[in-house]
Image (tube, rainbow, N blue to C red):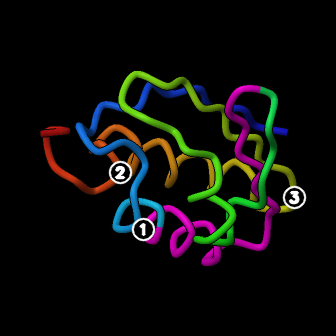
Amino acid sequence: METIAVIIKDELGLHAKPAFRLAQLANSFKSELLIENNERKVNGKSVLEILTLSANKGSEIKLVITGEDEKNAADGLKKLLNDSLGEGNGK
């Protein structure tokens, strides 16, 4: 199991475009991804479920990855998260 914690930096929070990028990347791996926010856990491979987290700017989310390629998935997700979920500098 790999775990990643990240603070949402985007002014709009975890909105549709970054949620899509996150789910799209998660779906490229065999491992399962759970995303947690305020004790709510959702399937990280589902854009709609990610959006129900209502993760606003400043929210801390936790990604829990389990499966045969969890290390590669964690590395890829960390890279995406370090780029503010593909939104550049988080503005």
Does residue 27 appear left or right of residue 7 in this picture? Answer: right
Q: From mark 1 to mark 2, how far is it between C-alphas?
A: 7 Å
Which residue was labeled with disc 1? 21
**Dot 1: few (<14), some (14–19), or many (≥20) neighbours within 10 Å?**
some
> In terms of sequence position, does the residue under pointer 1 or pointer 2 come before the other?
1
Q: Are marks 1 and 2 in contact (CB under 8 Å)?
A: yes
- Considering depth in this image, is 27 or 73 the residue closer to the camera? 27
Please state which of the two labelled residues, at mark 2 or mark 3, is closer to the viewer: 2
Quadrant position of residue 5: top right
Q: Amino acid at mark 3?
A: Gly
Q: Is residue 9 above or below residue 26?
A: above
- Considering depth in this image, is 24 or 8 the residue closer to the camera? 8
Which residue was labeled with disc 2? 85
Q: From mark 2 to mark 3, how far is it between C-alphas?
A: 22 Å
Which residue was labeled with disc 3? 67
Q: Is residue 29 magenta?
A: yes
Please state which of the two labelled residues, at mark 3 or mark 1, is closer to the viewer: 1
Q: Amino acid at mark 1?
A: Arg
**Dot 2: few (<14), some (14–19), or many (≥20) neighbours within 10 Å?**
many
Q: Are marks 2 and 3 in contact (CB under 8 Å)?
A: no
Please give the name of the residue rendered at 12% of the width and 39% of the height, measured from the top-left corner: 91
Q: Is residue 10 above or below residue 26?
A: above
Q: From mark 3 to mark 1, how far is it between C-alphas?
A: 20 Å
**Image coords of residue 44 (percent x, y):** 68, 59
**Image coords of residue 83 (percent x, y):** 27, 44
Please give the name of the residue rendered at 69% of the width and 63% of the height, measured from the top-left corner: 49
Q: Amino acid at mark 2?
A: Leu
Labelled disc at residue 61: none
Badge 1 marks a residue whose secondary structure is: helix
The magenta region covers: 20-38
- Considering depth in this image, is 35 or 49 the residue closer to the camera? 49
